[in-house]
Image (tube, rainbow, N blue to C red):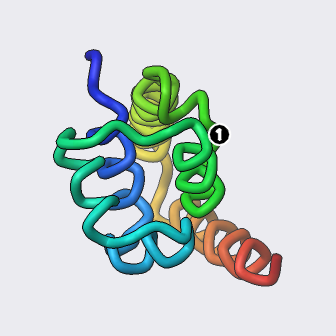
Amino acid sequence: MTTSIGERIREIRLSKHMSQELLSEKADISLCYLSSIELEKRNPSVNVICRLCEALEVSPSEVISDEYHIRKIRKSHSLSRIINSLQELSDSQLHEIEIIIKHLHRLNDQK
């Protein structure tokens, strides 16, 4: 599952619902340069990779290696196990889980 740095940057950016305009602004690079990186027309310097990672709030290893994809696969497997467990619960238990999840989201939003 090897992907290029540009492909990984694009995938991570999209997973965070971030536009190219916003990412280029946060990373202090031109929109044209970011687009050419994502399209694999240009290779970013280490400095630019670090700025993009900071703007995306990911580690450089997630962009340089397949670590991002590995974490995504692990998360998918975890979610599958959780869904399987939830299917065995009663409606009232599911409702309680839903309340807990909403509470966790509120706590996370306060950070």
Determine which residue is flagged by label 1: 59
- Residue 71 location (% of width, % of height): 51, 29
- The residue positioned farthest toward the top in the image shown: 1
Front residue of 28 and 1? 28
Query: Judging from the image, what secondary structure is the residue with disc 1 in?
Result: loop
Q: Quadrant of residue 16?
A: bottom left
Which quarter of the rendered picture does the N terminus lie within? top left
- Residue 13 location (% of width, % of height): 39, 59
Front residue of 24 and 91? 24
Disc 1 crowd, CA 10 A, few/some/many (<14, 14-19, 20+): some
Left or right: where does residue 108 sit relative to residue 19?
Answer: right
* Mark 1: amino acid: Ser
| Image height of 61 relative to 8, above or below | above
Q: Quadrant of residue 106?
A: bottom right
Left or right: where does residue 91 sit relative to residue 50?
Answer: left
Front residue of 73 and 44? 44
Left or right: where does residue 32 sit relative to residue 25?
Answer: left
Left or right: where does residue 99 sit relative to residue 94?
Answer: right
- Residue 102 location (% of width, % of height): 62, 76
Q: Residue at x 54, y 71 (%)?
A: 28
Front residue of 32 and 21? 32
Q: Residue at x 55, y 66 (%)?
A: 27
Q: Residue at x 27, y 25 (%)?
A: 3
